[in-house]
Each structure stands twice: as structure tokens, then as C-alpha cells.
């Protein structure tokens, strides 16, 4: 009845052209209510074929098939046979019925407030948005998944009825998010648990779904959460991929799958022990040995003991801890430590409490940091800084003595 190349109406289309096709009747379901449109083929007795990749309904009562002419040509007035891709439709039907089951399971586990706020039902997966204010716990997700699969395994028939809106309401049917309904509505019922108004296509029975696996749960807006899930063969593939990952992990850990958590736990604990040992060694290295004690580098500046040295570490936490250790050893004075890590210079200055009325660490570190092309600041008794010019770190450390001399009160 109509052809378009996407820009304007046309009378005919040849091989390779992307087209929009309208026929007088069609078995294709157009995208609606979150469910994707059908795909399939349109072909003539002469062997002309159009591969239909999507079906839309831009206006009520109008179904538009989006496709590509694969063979021959098509013209206004031609008769074509439309054939829906049944494997694609069956997968969509499984996921659509699964959204109804998931909706029921959510309200059963977390409360009646968990009403649908949107969905996207495709052949490969389903996406379901619902009202809730916080992330679901692992225990809640496991329970939702378990009772959903129990309902699927019960092989409940999926019953559709066209009834009045009042009757649907009296039966307790759930109307889905901001949709508008006429006097006659279509109610989809699964056992005595799930009753929803819905115009989409569904499985004949829940067993067709096979199984439902929740892939993720996340927040998408204020008060709205999202679950993504898979069913049918995609659920099986998801489980097989996870099992393969576990097998690979078990192989690397030289154990069986049940041993994976315990072995990983031991590795993590050992890593923590090694990190603690490494930090301890760093501090010992920074503090020096009896043969080369950094404290031998302390200078007297205007009667104040000042230590400004470079140490072989630069992460801020270790610098602070090491500077505190030197401050305790110096008893009364100023300590400045510098180090290099990842191509950047780091500095920290600490001042013993008896001198904070005469010196300010934040004031001293600013001109020192400028030497390495950076900046910093802090409290009167402790300040930190950093800069990109590592080559001038030693110069910056030497400048500390001059800054103390300038600023001592």
C-alpha cells in the first residue's frame, strides 16, 4: 500500500535499497509498551524478497515494516507474503512473560511499592525498571530469582482475556506505568499471582521461558532501580560462561571450583601481609641504618633543629608516617621529607608543637613546592605539596633551611 526510502514516498524499490513498507494486513507485531517489533521476511511469487529488520507503529493503526530489498524489486500494488521470524518472536515472548513474573517476584520480596516504571523487552535480554529507593541486597536478588524460577517450573498457562477495565480492576490487575487504557482491556494472567494489563505477545506457558537469570541490578534515577535479566538459551549461555570463568579460576588456583573462595581469601590475606611488610621495610629504609642514620643530616638554623632530606618513597601516607617518626626523634624542630614516584615529586613538612607559635608549616611549604613547579598547603604543624619537576627536588629540599631562617619568629 505504501513504500518509502525514509525521505519520501516512492513507487518502487530495487535490490539493496533500505525501505519502509506498509501492507493492508500484517502478522507482524509493532514495537509497543517496551517490547521490540517483529522481524522476518516479505517475499513474492516471483522470488522478490525483503528482509524486515524492525516493525514500528508511528501512528495508531499504522504498522510500518523497516527492511532491505535482498532480491528483485517491490512496487506499490504488489502482493507479498509476510513471514515472521519465529525464533526471534519466541525469544521476545519468553522475555516478555518473564517481565511479568519478575514484576510479581519483586513486589512479593520487597513490597507492593515496587511497581513497573519502564521496560525494554528484546530477543537477547530484558530490562525492567521499578520503583525502589535503595540497591537490592544479594539475598533479595537471590530470592527474587529463585521464586521467579519456581513459578516458571510450575508450567503455569499464560491466559489472556479481553475484559472491561472495571472487571480487570475488580480482579486486582496491575496497570503498567502511565499507560492509558480504553473501556476494553487485555489482561494477562499467570496462575493466581500475576495479573497485568498488557497488549504484548507472550509465551503459551511459563515453562517455555526455561529459566530466568538476573544479570545486574542498578539505579537509573531517583527512586527507580533497574534489573537486567536473560531467559531461555541466553540464560543457559550466561550460566555456562560463569561456570567457565570459575573453572579457569579453579585451574589457576590449582584446586576445585568449591575451593575457589577459600583459596582467593588466602591470597588476599597474604597480599595484605606482604603490603604491611613492604610498608615496614619502606619506613626502615627511610629511617636509615645505624651506619647511615639520616638524623646525622640535622642542621641548626637560628637555634632550631631542621632536617630536610630525600627518601626513596613518595606516597603521601608513607611520607607522613615517616615524617612523624623523625619528628618524634628530633624532639624539637622541623622535618621536611621529599620523594619521587610516578615522575612526580612529593613533599611533607612537620613541625614539633613547641615551635608552631614561631613557624608555620603551610607557609614554609608553598615557596618550597614552587621550586618543583607545584603547590601545597596545610596546618601550622603539618603541610604537604607536590610538583612535576622531580629534577629540582633536591634544590627544593635545600630551600627549606633558607625558608625556616626567613620565617622564624
Image: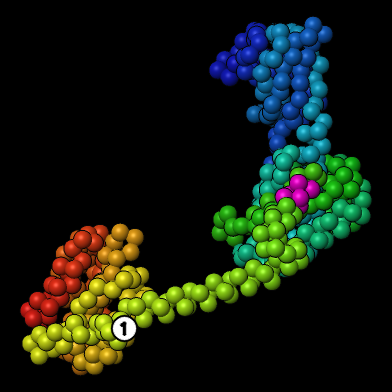
Residue at screen point 79% across, 48% down: 236
Q: Is residue 87 above or below residue 310?
A: above
Residue 306, visible in the rendered structure? yes
Where is residue 209? Give x, y as percent: 84, 46
Q: How is the image coloured?
A: rainbow
Q: Secondary structure at mark 1?
A: loop
Residue at screen point 89% across, 48% down: 207
Residue at screen point 73% across, 56% down: 247
Where is residue 83? Give x, y as percent: 81, 22
Determine which quarter of the picture holds residue 70: top right
Q: Nearer the viewer, residue 123 or 384?
A: 384
Residue at screen point 86% across, 53% down: 152
The boundaries of the magenta stretch are: 236-241
Q: What residue is pinned by disc 1?
A: 289
Crowding around mark 1 (Cα neighbors within 10 Å: few <14, some 14 to 19, many 20+) is few
Determine which quarter of the picture holds residue 376: bottom left
Q: Quadrant of the N terminus?
A: top right
Where is residue 271? Give x, y as percent: 54, 71
Q: Nearer the viewer, residue 177 or 240?
A: 240
Q: Quadrant of the C terminus?
A: bottom left
Instruction: Tell me, yes or no, whether the highlighted magenta stretch contains residue 145.
Output: no
User: Which residue reaches farthest front?
Assistant: 291
Does residue 307 appear left or right of residue 302 in this picture?
A: right
Does residue 2 appear left or right of residue 143 in this picture?
A: left
Amino acid at each position: 500500500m505504501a513504500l518509502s526510502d525514509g525521505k519520501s514516498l516512492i513507487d518502487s524499490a530495487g535490490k539493496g535499497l533500505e525501505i519502509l513498507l506498509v501492507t493492508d494486513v500484517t502478522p507482524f507485531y509493532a514495537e509497543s509498551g517496551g517490547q521490540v517489533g517483529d522481524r522476518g521476511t516479505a517475499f513474492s511469487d516471483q522470488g522478490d524478497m525483503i528482509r524486515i529488520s524492525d516493525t514500528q507503529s508511528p501512528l495508531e493503526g499504522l504498522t510500518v515494516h523497516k527492511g532491505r530489498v535482498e532480491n528483485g524489486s517491490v512496487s506499490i500494488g504488489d502482493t507479498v507474503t509476510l513471514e515472521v521470524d519465529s525464533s526471534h518472536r519466541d525469544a521476545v515472548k519468553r522475555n516478555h512473560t518473564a517481565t511479568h513474573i519478575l514484576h510479581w517476584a519483586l513486589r512479593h520480596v520487597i513490597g507492593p511499592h515496587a511497581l513497573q516504571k519502564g521496560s525494554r523487552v528484546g530477543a537477547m535480554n530484558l530490562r525492567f525498571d521499578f520503583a525502589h529507593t535503595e540497591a537490592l541486597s544479594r539475598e533479595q536478588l537471590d530470592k527474587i530469582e529463585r521464586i521467579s524460577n519456581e513459578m516458571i517450573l510450575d508450567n503455569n498457562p499464560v491466559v489472556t482475556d479481553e475484559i472491561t477495565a472495571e472487571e480487570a480492576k475488580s480482579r486486582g490487575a496491575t496497570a503498567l506505568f502511565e499507560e492509558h487504557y480504553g473501556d476494553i482491556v487485555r489482561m494477562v494472567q499467570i496462575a493466581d499471582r500475576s495479573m497485568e494489563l498488557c497488549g504484548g505477545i507472550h509465551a503459551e506457558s511459563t515453562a517455555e521461558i526455561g529459566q530466568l537469570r538476573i544479570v545486574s541490578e542498578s539505579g537509573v534515577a531517583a527512586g527507580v532501580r533497574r534489573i537486567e535479566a536473560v531467559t531461555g538459551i541466553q540464560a543457559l549461555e550466561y550460566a555456562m560462561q560463569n561456570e567457565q570463568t570459575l573453572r579457569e579460576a579453579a585451574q589457576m588456583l590449582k584446586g576445585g571450583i568449591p575451593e575457589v573462595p577459600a583459596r582467593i581469601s588466602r591470597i588476599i590475606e597474604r597480599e595484605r601481609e606482604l603490603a604491611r611488610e613492604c610498608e615496614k621495610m619502606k619506613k626502615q629504609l627511610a629511617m636509615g641504618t645505624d651506619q647511615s642514620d639520616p638524623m646525622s643530616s640535622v642542621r641548626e638554623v637560628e637555634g632550631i633543629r631542621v632536617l630536610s632530606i630525600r627518601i626513596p618513597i613518595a606516597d603521601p601516607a608513607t611520607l607522613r608516617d615517616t615524617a612523624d617518626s623523625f619528628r618524634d626523634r628530633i624532639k624539637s624542630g622541623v622535618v621536611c621529607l621529599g620523594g619521587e614516584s610516578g615522575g612526580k615529586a612529593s613533599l611533607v613538612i612537620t613541625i614539633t608543637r613547641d615551635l608552631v607559635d614561631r613557624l608555620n608549616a603551610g607557609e614554609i611549604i608553598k615557596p618550597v613546592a614552587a621550586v618543583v613547579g607545584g603547590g601545597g598547603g596545610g596546618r601550622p604543624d603539618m603541610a604537604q605539596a607536590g610538583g612535576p619537576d622531580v629534577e629540582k627536588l633536591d634544590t627544593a629540599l635545600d630551600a627549606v633551611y633558607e625558608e625556616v631562617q626567613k620565617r622564624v619568629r
